[in-house]
């Protein structure tokens, strides 16, 4: 028989018709084992209908979507897929049902009823009090006081019936939906947001969300201040230009995400600068996380921190680290120099498209274009392009060396600077590696393009270069 997850007691009426391709599911009885439906139908040599599932953890499967030489679907990993009977899977439960399961007082002791706790996203314990009566209606009335709730990894897949959520928890301010089944929200419309405008923090981490269009639906939550989207599969971010006329709020003056101050996007698949630039359009955004995205990983062709700081004009906290006034100024100046060193065209429209803040920052910091130097010679020509940088030796084989401050032409390449360092510090048979220290970064950032000049890398006067050795 095809490999499948361990069976658990479930309702026998579950059939393949209950599932659809692309649907998020979990193993019946185990809401923490999450996967995506990739196949529905027969499996050669085995009777009945089967569901092909690609499991998130990449382990615990038996194959890659093929069986006995026949391919049914393509799984992410070589052993991340299984075929399961429909009764071995669950499509999830509604959010109101999950809240009742987690917080309704049932057969608890008096001490347990007196005080229960949920955990906020900052791991602070938030008290939820119940009066401890046996009447169901009185138990449900206690939900009126519920301000913080966590239903993480409970297999939540839908919002529930219209107005049910608002009736159940009308004063909810913090909702943690980490690790549930909200990759697509066919039911996320007026049901969720109409009349439910007390919510200030929504945590949707680890839900396999791959479409920003799904997130835009949340723009109708007018009170939302924090949105946690770490560990999803988002590739792009785009600020909605206006609220959809099909949305629950008929207000031409409504501003999407008007009160959103914190947006956590770490560990996604964002790889374009237009997504970074679009964050400037969120009217109240001050705290952004982009770490562990390709766009923020220099090793994958992404940008170092100073570029992100310069492109994000209003953000005060980036990747959990506060941006000081000094860091912002130095980052913006370095970014302008970087762009000036790399632009090959004088097409202002193209420059504006690729670097929306370039002209503004260039003017704000009073940075002038490089003047032609063909008629200038001698010391005057040399002085016009000199920058002052500090060099610090840290290599274990280099011995104790005092830092040096040198004036060098801005056109000095990284390769040339390495050679100069070998000469300055009398380094023999040591292959040099350079790093630049940046405020706000816990570790110096590598400088690896030997053919790039200091000007092209945005390195200007006052910079500190760390001289290390190749490991």
Image (tube, rainbow, N blue to C red):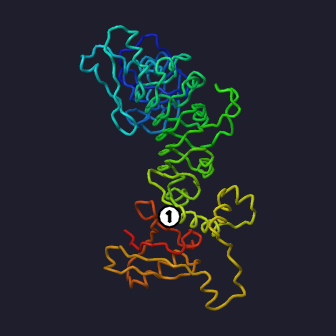
Crowd tier of the residue under label 1, counting other residues whose Cα lies within 10 Å: few below 14, some 14–19, many 20 or above: few
Give percent across and percent down for residue 297: 50, 55
Is 111 above or below relative to 451? Answer: above
- Where, by quadrant of the figure, is residue 341 drawn? bottom right
Q: Residue furthest bottom?
A: 378
What is the number of callouts on the image? 1
Q: Nearer the viewer, residue 149 or 182?
A: 149
Quadrant for the N terminus, please: top left
Q: Is residue 85 left or right of residue 130?
A: right
- The residue lying toward the viewer, choosing from 50 and 149, is 149
Q: Does 77 appear above or below 357?
A: above
Q: Which residue is mark 1?
A: 326
The quadrant of the picture occupied by the C terminus is bottom left
Q: Is residue 13 above or below residue 117?
A: above
* Residue 265 position in % (x across, y down): 50, 44
Q: Residue at x 58, y 72 (%)?
A: 455
Q: Is residue 147 above or below residue 422?
A: above
């Amino acid at each position: 028989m095809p490999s499948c997850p361990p069976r658990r007691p479930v309702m026998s009426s579950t059939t393949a018709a209950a599932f659809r391709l692309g649907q998020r599911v979990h193993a019946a009885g185990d809401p923490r084992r999450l996967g995506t439906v990739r196949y529905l139908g027969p499996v050669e040599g085995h009777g009945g209908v089967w569901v092909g599932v690609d499991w998130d953890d990449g382990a615990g499967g038996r194959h890659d979507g093929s069986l006995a030489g026949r391919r049914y679907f393509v799984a992410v990993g070589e052993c991340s897929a299984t075929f399961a009977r429909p009764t071995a899977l669950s499509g999830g439960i509604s959010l109101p049902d999950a809240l009742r399961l987690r917080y309704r007082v049932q057969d608890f002791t008096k001490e347990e009823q007196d005080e229960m706790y949920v955990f906020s996203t900052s791991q602070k314990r938030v008290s939820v009090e119940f009066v401890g009566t046996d009447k169901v209606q009185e138990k449900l009335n206690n939900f009126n006081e519920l301000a913080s709730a966590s239903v993480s990894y409970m297999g939540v897949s839908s919002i529930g019936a219209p107005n049910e959520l608002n009736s159940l928890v009308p004063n909810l301010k913090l909702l943690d939906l980490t690790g549930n089944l909200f990759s697509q929200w066919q039911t996320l419309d007026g049901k969720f947001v109409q009349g439910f405008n007390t919510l200030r923090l929504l945590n949707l981490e680890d839900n396999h969300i791959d479409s920003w269009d799904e997130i835009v639906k949340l723009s109708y939550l007018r009170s939302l201040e924090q949105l946690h989207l770490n560990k999803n599969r988002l590739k792009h971010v785009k600020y909605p230009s206006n609220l959809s006329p099909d949305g629950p709020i008929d207000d031409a003056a409504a501003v999407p995400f008007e009160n959103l101050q914190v947006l956590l996007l770490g560990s996604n698949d964002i790889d374009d600068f237009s997504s970074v630039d679009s964050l400037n359009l969120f009217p109240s955004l001050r705290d952004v996380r982009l770490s562990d995205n390709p766009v923020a990983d220099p090793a994958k062709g992404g940008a170092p921190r100073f570029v992100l700081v310069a492109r994000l004009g209003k953000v005060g906290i980036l990747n959990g680290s506060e941006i000081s006034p000094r860091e912002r100024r130095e980052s913006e100046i370095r970014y302008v120099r970087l762009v000036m060193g790399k632009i090959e065209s004088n097409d202002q429209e193209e420059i504006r498209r690729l670097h929306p803040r370039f002209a503004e920052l260039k003017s704000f910091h009073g940075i002038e274009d490089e003047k032609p130097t063909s008629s200038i010679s001698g010391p005057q020509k040399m002085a016009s392009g000199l920058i002052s940088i500090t060099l610090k030796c840290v290599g274990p084989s280099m011995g104790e060396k005092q830092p040096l401050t040198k004036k060098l032409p801005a056109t000095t390449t990284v390769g040339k600077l390495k050679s100069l360092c070998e000469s300055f510090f009398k380094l023999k048979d040591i292959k040099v590696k350079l790093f630049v220290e940046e405020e706000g970064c816990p570790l110096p950032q590598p400088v690896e393009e030997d053919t790039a000049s200091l000007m092209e890398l945005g390195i200007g006067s006052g910079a500190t270069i760390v001289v290390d050795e190749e490991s």
